[in-house]
Structure formats: structure tokens, C-alpha cells
């Protein structure tokens, strides 16, 4: 792989292959997926594993909140989807800066009483 890509991407030093095994409840058969990563540095397998896990921890934490609390995947935005996603990110950042950990519950409470929402977030609006 490195020889094939060397001309187009000369800074790639290593290609990392990660095989993931996953078992889900109520599923008859486990699944296996293969992911490839590229790096411009040479690190140990332990370091790559640490960095990949940290990346997926952040990715899963953010995407799960956006899907559950804001139903982002259930709402297809055909025009300016990046603006919609950015607005969700801003709302998440403001909510987390206030120390709120249960985003979905907070959204529900705030939609029931706009005055409560306004008092809580007025300094950020």
C-alpha cells in the first residue's frame, strides 16, 4: 500500500489495520469490521490503539448525543446541512458549559417553560 500511494501522499509512513469484533444482544451472530488508518509518524501498536480509542470515544459521545437529543439522523436537511449541524454543536457547547449532563432531559424541560430556558441561558444569547 505504501509503495502504491508514495507518489500521491509522500508523508504517509504507516498504514494501520484495525479489526473490530462486535457482539450485540439479541443478534445471532457477531460482526467483524476492518478499518484502515494512515499515519505520518511511526508509533507503537499500543499508542495507535490508544489514539484510535480516544478518537472513537469522542466521536461516539458526540454523535450519540446529537442523534438521541436532537434526532439529527432522523431529520434530513437538504439545504445547508452544515449550518444545521453547527447550530446543534453550538447548542451542545452552551448546554455543557452550564454543567448540564443530561442534554435530552434539559431540552425537554426547557421546551415546557421558555422563561426557565431564558433565565438559564440569557448570558449566552
Image: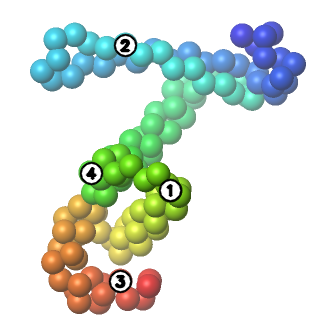
Question: For the view shown, which residue lies furthest in the left direction?
Answer: 26
Expressed as whole percent of the image width and height from the top left, the position of residue 39 reads 69, 27
Query: Which quadrant of the figure has residue 47?
Result: top right
Q: Residue sitting at 76 percent across and 24 percent down? A: 12
**CA separation in Å, label 4 and label 1:** 22 Å
Q: Are marks 2 and 4 in contact (CB under 8 Å)?
A: no
Expressed as whole percent of the image width and height from the top left, the position of residue 85 reads 46, 57
**CA separation in Å, label 3 and label 2:** 44 Å
User: Mark 4 Cα within 10 Å, few/some/many (few <14, many 20+)?
Assistant: few
Expressed as whole percent of the image width and height from the top left, the position of residue 90 reads 46, 67
Q: Are marks 4 and 1 in contact (CB under 8 Å)?
A: no
Badge nearest the viewer, 3 or 4: 4
Q: Residue sitting at 78 percent across and 17 percent down? A: 5
**Marked residue nearer the N-terminal end (3 or 2):** 2
User: Between 57 and 89, which is closer to the camera in this rendering?
Assistant: 89
**CA separation in Å, label 2 and label 4:** 25 Å
Look at the image and tell me in which quarter the N terminus lies.
top right
Q: Are marks 1 and 3 in contact (CB under 8 Å)?
A: no
Circle 2 residue: 32
Q: Residue sitting at 30 percent across and 53 percent down? A: 71
Badge nearest the viewer, 1 or 3: 1
**Marked residue nearer the N-terminal end (2 or 1):** 2
* Badge number at residue 97: none
User: Between 25 and 107, which is closer to the camera in this rendering?
Assistant: 107
Circle 3 residue: 121
Circle 4 residue: 68
**CA separation in Å, label 2 and label 1:** 35 Å
**Marked residue nearer the N-terminal end (1 or 3):** 1
**CA separation in Å, label 1 and label 3:** 28 Å
Look at the image and tell me in which quarter the C terminus lies.
bottom left
User: Between 54 and 64, which is closer to the camera in this rendering?
Assistant: 64
Amino acid at each position: 500500500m505504501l509503495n502504491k500511494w508514495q507518489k500521491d501522499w509522500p508523508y504517509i509512513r504507516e498504514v494501520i489495520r484495525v479489526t473490530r469484533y462486535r457482539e450485540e444482544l439479541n443478534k445471532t451472530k457477531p460482526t467483524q469490521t476492518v478499518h484502515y488508518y494512515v499515519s505520518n509518524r511511526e508509533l507503537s501498536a499500543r499508542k495507535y490503539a490508544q489514539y484510535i480509542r480516544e478518537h472513537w470515544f469522542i466521536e461516539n459521545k458526540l454523535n450519540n448525543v446529537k442523534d438521541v437529543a436532537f434526532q439529527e439522523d432522523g431529520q434530513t436537511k437538504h439545504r445547508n446541512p452544515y449550518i444545521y449541524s453547527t447550530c446543534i454543536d453550538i447548542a451542545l457547547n452552551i448546554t455543557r458549559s452550564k454543567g448540564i449532563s443530561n442534554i435530552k432531559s434539559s431540552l425537554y424541560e426547557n421546551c415546557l417553560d421558555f422563561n426557565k430556558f431564558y433565565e438559564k441561558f440569557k448570558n449566552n444569547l
